[in-house]
Image (spheres, grey):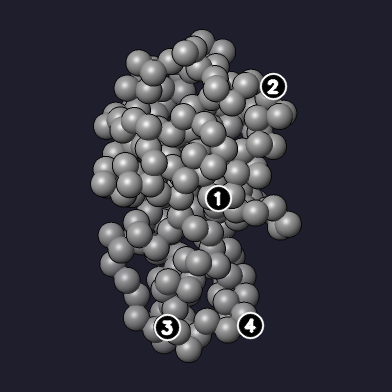
Amino acid sequence: MKYNAVIFDLDGTLLDSVEDLADSVNMVLENMGLPAYETEKYKYFVGDGLHKLLERTLPPEKHDEATIASCSARFLEIYGKRAANKTRPYAGIPELLDELDRRNVKKAILSNKPHPATVELVRKLLSNWKFDFVFGERPGVPKKPDPASVFEIVNAIGVPIGQILYLGDTAVDMKTANAAGIYAVGVLWGFRKADELIGAGADVIIEKPLELLKLL
């Protein structure tokens, strides 16, 4: 099979962003007089959208919608100022994107990060490469693992499902790919481990970004 398009997750797949995410949430928590978490724990807190991230870091008595909404606004304010402080593309990602551009492979990004933050981070750190679509979590659109945004991308780029690869680092990504009927590529340089990806339906596991080229 020849693959002519790749849909990428963002955090943990293209960008090593966990430190800036952790620092921003910890600032929200500390401002509320709550304990912070070590950065490593955020590799398992993130991936399911901002609402779920805050539910996982706030104590149960703080899960009311008013508190979540207030913390969301505060997080976005903080994160908007520091999202690119420590975040960088993973080693090998620039070279992979260069080669995909050279081969005219269509590319899209689908994240559960809020859409404006997703677009801004891509603008700051990935503007050297052409992405046909960049989608974060958008109001009124189900977030991953619902395949709605995948189908939106597929219909717009005009590449058949069978000619698209989906690249991600979490179970959510593998479930998204499976729900859409797209070949699921789990990556080991991100936030999660192989057993989670395989258990969630990964068709193949790769250890380094340039290994993706073998699949093309």
Residue annotated with mark 1: 144
Residue annotated with mark 4: 66
Tell me where residue 42 appears, x and y as whole percent.
36, 61
Q: Earlier in the sequence, mark 2 or mark 1?
A: 1
Residue placed most toward the observer, 187 or 131: 187
Tell me where residue 117 appears, x and y as whole percent.
59, 52
Residue annotated with mark 3: 59
Q: Residue at x 64, y 21 (%)?
A: 159
Residue placed most toward the observer, 23 or 40: 40
Question: Marks 2 and 3: CB-CB under 8 Å?
Answer: no
Residue flagged by tag 2: what amino acid is it? Gly
Residue flagged by tag 3: what amino acid is it? Pro
Tell me where residue 83 appears, x and y as whole percent.
49, 53
Foreground label between 4 and 1: 1
Say whether residue 90 is visible.
Answer: no
Residue annotated with mark 2: 158
Q: Rounded to the nearest whole Å, what is the CA distance between mark 2 and mark 3?
A: 45 Å
